Amino acid sequence: MGASPFLADLIRRVAEARLQAAGVHIVVIAEFEDLEAARGGVRELRADIVILGGAEALPAPIEGGPAPMLGLSADLTTIYGPGKDNIAGLTPENLAMRLLQCSATRRPLLY
Amino acid sequence: MEPSAWRGACSVPFVRETLVVSAICFLRQSLVEILGRAPEVRVSGEAANLDRAVEVARATRPTIVLLDAAFPGGTQSAQIIGAAAPDASLIALGIRETEQDVLAWAEAGAAGYVPNTASVDDLIELIGQISRGEQACPSNIAGSLLRRVAASRRAEAPAPAAGPPLTRREIEIIGLLSEGLSNKDIARRLRISLGTTKSHVHNLLGKLGLPRRADVMARMGPWAEIAPPKPNPASRPNEINPPSGRATRPNEISPPPALAALLIDPHSTLR
């Protein structure tokens, strides 16, 4: 939610540098500023990972979207997921580690 | 040759020592990492709070301070950090590109800004532009900045003379008072009655807001001494006297502002 192009670009860059070594390539395929717009996009774009901004807990999977969810708190201090009790401070390292855990999928979707 | 032209000719990137200031760990660490890969930027330090920012700014003397617009204290923090790094260009990162926000940051001393719609590549390019004194911005923002500068200049201009205007006779009396003449001497010099002289002096002191005649000399200072009015028997009390001698005297000392306005446009004061 409310993903700015700048934040999306920042996430892609810091994740890319860390995931390349593991043979994982990350591509931000879309950014959405509201959840309603994202619902259709998740199904259409077949995203592999969904990162939800403005989250206060692990986001529930979007209906019809098989992708695992990661949540970022609005103040960008906390990352939620994957998994219910997986909560940590948001740092480039923690973000990359969680994206790696989701690496069975192939493409992230930011919104 | 302009520094930028020299840099271009030599193909050597000009490295900008950059201090990254953000309370958000992810943003700060990410920026340090990404900017650290850019050849034209060298991250000289990072800070998560104001005290640390001031400390690092003083120690590393950066040429660029990249300040997260969401930093606690906002524009006030920008002023404090700017004071600690007076040679640095402060860049507000991630501001909403509205007239209100841009003006607020400009007034806080920001040399430029990066809107929250920019990409990281944009950021690096903008750092270069801003450090060269450039800033791309929408026309409505540019218009607002111009209007603000114009309003600021108007505010700095000398205020027009306040209060009731002085008559030519009262201006003459200022000169005579500055010579230390008594009311009786003034009356004799101007060939008017003592009662009329007292009335003029009383009105003059009232208009100038001065309690005593001795204060006139102190208020007028050397200006009053330069051109004491000559007795002019032919003049009438309300006659307009053009400011011919005042404006062209080579050694003239500027009069006090309130009276300067009077002399610049004496006709209006005497209508």
Image: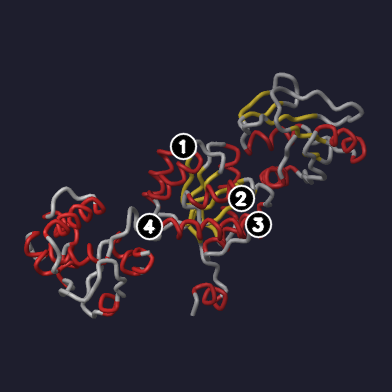
Q: Chain of mark 2?
A: B
Q: Say yes or no: labels 4 and 3 on the same chain.
A: yes
Q: Name the residue carrying label 3.
A: B140
* For residue B49, side relative to residue A38 (left or right): left
Q: Can residue A17 be seen in the rendering of this structure?
A: no
- The local crowd at label 4, few if under 14, some if 14 to 19, many if 20 or more residues have their Cα within 10 Å, is few
Q: Amino acid at mark 2?
A: Glu
Q: Are marks 3 and 1 on the same chain?
A: yes
Residue in the image at 56% along x and 36% along y: B25
Residue under label 2, please give it.
Answer: B99
Q: Chain of mark 4?
A: B
- Residue hosting label 4: B159
Q: Nearer the viewer, mark 1 or mark 4?
A: 4
Which residue appears at 33% of the width and 55% of the height?
A: B164
Name the kind of residue labelled 1 in the image. Asn
Residue closer to the observer: A39 or B138: B138
Residue B161 position in % (x across, y down)? 34, 58
Badge nearest the viewer, 2 or 4? 4
